[in-house]
Image: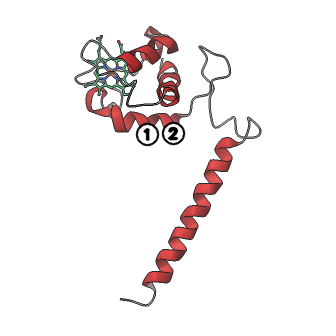
Amino acid sequence: MKKWFVPGILTACCLLAILLVFFSLREDEPSGGSHEAAPSATAGEGAATVDAEAATAIYKANCISCHGDQLQGGMGPALTQVGAEMSQDDIHKQIANGGGGMPAFKGRLSDEEINTVAVWLASKK
Ligand code: HEC
């Protein structure tokens, strides 16, 4: 075992932990200085902001196989402009209940996660 290995890993872990804390603090920050980074959704419940990072993570884990890595569609329809055709509410219902060949995500994703994705998709127009 090389001498630097254990201290190296420890340092890397510490740095990672600091970064994680830093980023989660920044996300929790009330719309203080950072709202230029998160465009707010135009439709729907007014104050809902698009958390594109969280939404893409959920999308990648659950939706990419049918809707494609660029929302271009595949087995399911393209979602690139879904916000122009469906309200945030409709999108939420489609994800929660599925239908037309799409599985329901109600039990698999929390309501909050579905909402995060719905707000994000509703901004695609
Ligand atoms: C097993 C494949 C599959 C998966 C996984 C899947 N979908 Fe779908 N999705 C479909 C199909 C098929 C339709 C078309 C349903 C219809 O025409 O009624 C659809 C429709 C939709 C629609 C409505 C689009 C429109 O124009 O009618 C939305 C929004 C949507 N999916 C979002 C998602 C999201 C978000 C996820 C991940 C949480 C997801 N889908 C996962 C297959 C899938």
Looking at the rendering, in which quadrant would you find the N terminus? bottom left
Q: Nearer the viewer, residue 85 or 61?
A: 61
Instruction: Measure the alpha-carbon separation of dots 2 and 1.
Output: 6 Å
Circle 1 sits in a helix, a strand or a loop, which is it?
helix
**Residue 27's image quarter?**
top right
Q: Is residue 66 left or right of residue 34?
A: left
**What amino acid type should be assigned to the residue bearing mark 2?**
Glu
Residue at image coords 62%, 34%: 38
Residue furthest to the right: 32
Residue at image coords 51%, 39%: 53
Task: Name the residue beneath numbered marker 1.
Answer: 57
Q: Nearer the viewer, residue 53 or 80?
A: 53
The color scheme shown is secondary structure
Figure quarter occupied by ligand 1? top left
**Residue 60's image quarter?**
top left
Residue furthest to the front: 107
Q: Is residue 18 left or right of residue 32?
A: left
**Mark 2 vs 1: CB contact within 8 A:** yes
Circle 2 sits in a helix, a strand or a loop, which is it?
helix
- Would you call the spot at circle 2 few (<14 residues within 10 Å), some (14-19), or many (20 or more)? few
Residue 40 appears at what percent x and percent y? 63, 25
Q: Nearer the viewer, residue 32 or 81?
A: 32
Q: Is mark 1 within 8 Å of ligand 1?
A: no
Q: How many discs mark residues in the rendered view?
A: 2
Task: Name the residue beneath numbered marker 2.
Answer: 53
